[in-house]
Image: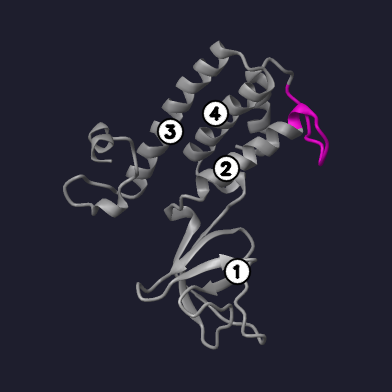
Amino acid sequence: MTELEAVNTMLRAIGQVPVINIPPSGQSDSRVALDILNENAKEFQAEGFDFNQNTGEELTPTVDSLIELPEGTVRVTSYYPYQRFVERGGLLYDLDRATTEFTQPVKVNRVFVLPFEELPYALQRYVNIRSARVFASRAVGAQELNSYLGEEEVRARLQWLQAQAVDMDLNVLSTPSHHRPNVFQPYRSIIR
């Protein structure tokens, strides 16, 4: 699915006519819809999934002893449990030593954002429907429309989770709990 197809789905959700192209800037409905689509795609990807994270990625310091994080990085952690790293101003920051200076390469787990068109189809659909609900809520505010899109969003999220389970070959008997998708389970609300 392209960004244009997603934006047209969002426009149809509020009764607008589809567009042929999206302006690069401005406050047109199509531009606002695209911004909401990208906002939701980034927010969802920040959770980190198999398709948008590198585990054990080696980052090398520059001649200035800094490690610049690649564009699109939304979260970084140490590969090893005895080190603690975060992102600060586009640089890797060592929490234990309180510095951005590194003399050796380090291994990290890095979560990054992919463009909408590179996401798996089930996730594209979920992000698109969720974005359509948010867009409709902001643009029109119709309660019935929001309710209908909310139901569609739940179905799309379920399809996304099912696709994840199949792709990851998850099994309730043999898959470690840290590999299972984080879905709502009523008994967990009592544990809080």
Picture residue at 31% right of the left edge, 52% below the top? 179
Q: Is residue 45 above or below residue 121?
A: below
Q: Is residue 105 above or below residue 177?
A: below
Quadrant of the snapshot with the C terminus? top left
Q: Which mark is residue 157?
A: 3
Magenta stretch: give its range. 18-30
Do tag 4 and tag 3 residues touch (Cβ < 8 Å)? no
Q: Check the image and report above or below for 8 versus 38.
A: above
Q: Nearer the viewer, mark 4 or mark 1?
A: 1
- Going 29% across and 54% down the picture, which residue do you hit? 178
Asked if labels 2 and 3 touch by Cβ distance under 8 angstroms, the answer is no
Q: Amino acid at mark 3?
A: Arg
> Is residue 47 inside the magenta stretch?
no
Q: Which mark is on residue 129? A: 4
Q: Majority secondary structure of the magenta segment? A: loop
| CA distance separating discs 1 and 3 | 31 Å
Report how far apart the C-alphas of labels 1 and 2 lie in the structure. Answer: 20 Å
Indicate yes or no whether the magenta region holds residue 28: yes
Percent coordinates x, y for residue 92 in the rendering: 56, 72
